[in-house]
Amino acid sequence: MKTIKNSLILLTITILTITFHYQAAAQLKYYKGYVIPLKGDTLKGEIESNPKKEIDHFRKIKYRARAGMPTKGFIAGKIKEYKMDSTIFISRKIDDQDVFIKLIVPGKINIYEGRTEDVDGKEVTLLPDYFYLKGEETVLVQDKPSRFKKQMMALMADNTAIVKAIADDTYTYSNVLELFKAYNK
């Protein structure tokens, strides 16, 4: 009797382990892309993505040359950039931390999105932060209304129509992406 009970427990554990393994593997997808190391040639291949762990795209990536090949992990600060499908992420040091930021509006002034985790009890929310590059410096787009206006008016001073729209509150932090799209036209 004890042997049957032990066998049933072992069978249940085995089934659960296999189920969890296949669920975890089923979540992973691979997208065509590339990795640009700090030194060396561009590595073309596939980038791993887990839709349930979106924050990983902003911290680390897994690359493989092609299906069936082993993956290699890279963290921000150890590569220049990577591309997954049609999305480009660049490596930057922000607040003394190496992170990836995602290009979301390309143009005369590129705007990038970074993500931070906000933990409230057991609930984790991903919050966006917006950045633009000024030379080699990565600059946070200010989210406080007075700072936002001053920062954007100075940045876009060469376009009087945009500066007027910022002054008139046509553009605020809540529609910052539209502002950069309008400026880049």
Image (tube, rainbow, N blue to C red):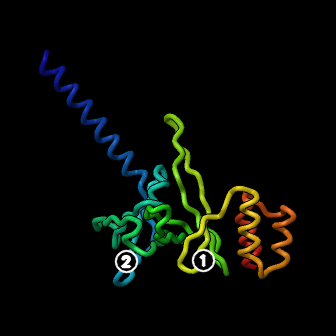
**Residue appearing at x 16%, y 23% in the figure:** 6
Examine the rendered structure and indicate whether residue 182 appears above or below residue 29.
below
Residue 66, position as x, y percentages in the image: 34, 71
Return the mark for residue 117: none
Q: Quadrant of residue 143?
A: bottom right
Q: Which residue is mark 1?
A: 134
* Between 70 and 164, the one nearer to me in the picture: 164
Q: Is residue 15 left or right of residue 57?
A: left
* Type of amino acid under label 1: Lys
Identify the residue under disc 2: 37
- How far apart are labels 2 and 1 at the CA level? 22 Å
Of labels 2 and 1, earlier in sequence is 2
Q: Position of residue 133 (x, y in %)?
A: 59, 74
Is 105 drawn above or below residue 26 in the view shown? below
Question: Seen from this angle, which residue lies furthest bottom?
Answer: 41
Residue 29 versus residue 92: which sits nearer the camera? 92
In the image, taking residue 182 as reference, residue 60 lies left or right, namely left
Q: Residue at x 84, y 63 (%)?
A: 170
Q: Quadrant of residue 4?
A: top left
Residue type at numbered disc 2:
Pro
Q: Classify mark 2: helix, strand or loop.
A: strand
Element under label 1? Answer: strand
Left or right: where 132 falls relative to 74: right
How many other residues sit within 10 Å of disc 1, few (<14), some (14-19) or many (≥20)?
A: few
- Measured as percent of width and height from the top left, residue 81 is found at 45, 74
What percent of the width, then of the height, locates residue 144? 71, 56
Q: Quadrant of residue 180?
A: bottom right
Q: Quadrant of the N terminus?
A: top left
Image position of 116 (left or right of 163): left
Q: Nearer the viewer, mark 2 or mark 1?
A: 1
Residue 73 lies, with reference to residue 39, above or below; the image says: above
